[in-house]
Image (cartoon, helix red, strand yellow):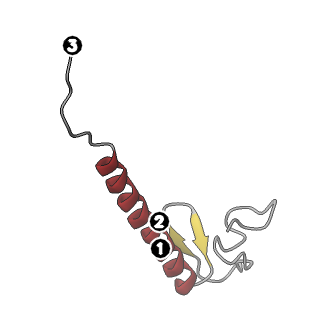
């Protein structure tokens, strides 16, 4: 989920869109993604890891289906 429209990237949590306070801790992930809590940050990490695992499985599956076996006869 993206922060609410028009927000500066350090004004809202990248996951839940909760406004970030000026004198509160901000938890960063992947360079420029701010989070309001360690829990939101961890949830995003788990979402990204799950996407990566699904992508790797899909890629491996696609590689298997593209393998051609059999005999080719040329006349």
Q: How many neighbours does mark 3 have within 10 angstroms: few (below 14), some (14-19), or many (20 or more)? A: few
Q: Nearer the viewer, residue 18 or 43?
A: 43
Q: How many neighbours does mark 2 have within 10 angstroms: few (below 14), some (14-19), or many (20 or more)? A: few
Residue in view at x 47 percent, y 73 percent: 45
Q: Position of residue 7 (x, y in %)?
A: 77, 63
User: Along the polypeptide, which appears first: circle 3 or circle 1?
Assistant: 1
Disc 3 is placed on an element classified as: loop
- Above or below, 70 against 51 in this view is above
Q: Which residue is mark 2?
A: 51
Disc 2 is placed on an element classified as: helix
**For residue 26, which quarter of the picture?**
bottom right
**For residue 56, which quarter of the picture?**
bottom left
Residue 75's label in the rendered image is 3
Residue in view at x 69 percent, y 65 percent: 2
Q: Position of residue 52 (x, y in %)?
A: 42, 63
**Disc 3 versus disc 2: nearer the observer:** 3
Q: Which residue is mark 1?
A: 45
Looking at the figure, which quarter contains the C terminus? top left
User: Along the polypeptide, which appears first: circle 3 or circle 2?
Assistant: 2
Q: Position of residue 60 (x, y in %)?
A: 32, 55
Q: Nearer the viewer, residue 26 or 40?
A: 40
- Above or below, 44 against 38 in this view is above
Q: Horizontally, is 20 left or right of 59 in the view? A: right
Real-space CA distance between mark 1 and mark 2, rounded to the nearest whole angstrom: 10 Å
Q: Position of residue 44 (x, y in %)?
A: 53, 74
Q: Are marks 1 and 2 in contact (CB under 8 Å)?
A: no
């Amino acid at each position: 989920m993206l922060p609410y429209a028009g927000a500066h990237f350090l004004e809202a949590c990248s996951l839940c869109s909760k406004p970030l306070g000026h004198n509160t801790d901000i938890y960063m992930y992947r360079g420029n993604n701010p989070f309001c809590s360690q829990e939101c940050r961890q949830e995003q990490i788990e979402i990204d890891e799950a996407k990566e695992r699904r992508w790797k499985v899909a890629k491996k599956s696609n590689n298997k289906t593209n393998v051609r076996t059999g005999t080719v006869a040329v006349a």
